[in-house]
Structure formats: C-alpha cells, structure tokens
Amino acid sequence: MSARFRIVDLRTDPENPQELFVASARSPEEAARLAIGEVLVRSGQRKDLRCRVYFQQEGQPTTMVRLYRRVEDRP
C-alpha cells in the first residue's frame, strides 16, 4: 500500500500550521515520521495532538487521521 500524504504540522502554531508532503509511505504514521521526525500514534489527548495526515489511495476518497505524541514521549 502506497499513497501520497499531506501532513499538517500542529506542533508550533495551530492557527497557521505548516504543511509537509511525503510522496510515498506505507502508513500515515510512517509519513509523519518521515516528515517531522517523531514516532506518533493514532490515539491520545487533545493536548498531545501533533499533526493531521491526509492521504488518498488510488480510486479512493481522501482520508484524514490525527496523530498524537506517544505516552512514552509525554512529559
């Protein structure tokens, strides 16, 4: 499974987030790791939200997942 990914980086400025693009990855988590250098998970608290990842498989609608900081990485 390979898709194009758009990562909306919410780490610094949620009002004006930076958008990053990854041409190919096997999962949204891998795309985020390649783009922002963090290992993230799909569940967490709102305060730990790090990015939104938009992706589209060929012939499918666009999908979005929210990725959060891992429990191990939280202060």
Image (cartoon, helix red, strand yellow):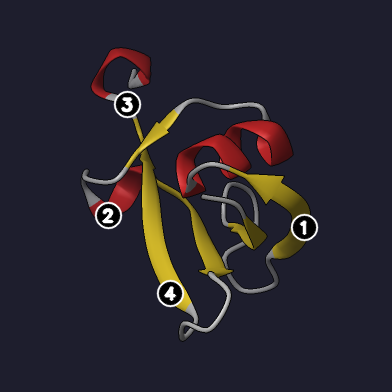
Alpha-carbon distance for marks 1 and 2? 23 Å
What is the x, y in percent for residue 12? Answer: 64, 49
Q: Which label number is shown at residue 46?
A: 2
Which residue in the protein does label 4 denote? 63
Query: Total number of numbered labels?
Result: 4
Instruction: Work out whether mark 1 precedes mark 4 in sequence or the reverse, and give the earlier one.
Output: 1
Task: Tell me the SS state at disc 4.
Answer: strand
Query: Whole-Å distance between the Cαs marked 2 and 3?
Result: 12 Å
Whichever of labels 4 and 3 marks the residue nearer the N terminus, that label is: 4
Q: Which residue is mark 1?
A: 21
3D distance between C-alphas at marks 1 and 4: 15 Å
Residue 5 pos. (x, y %)? 65, 60
- Counting residues from the N terminus, which is met first, the one under dot 2 or under dot 3? 2
Quadrant in which the C terminus appears: top left
Residue drawn 55% across the image and 35% down it:
30
* Residue type, numbered disc 3: Arg
Q: Which residue is mark 3?
A: 70
Give 8 or 10, whichever is nearer the viewer.
8
Residue type beneath disc 2 = Arg
Q: Nearer the viewer, mark 1 or mark 2?
A: 1
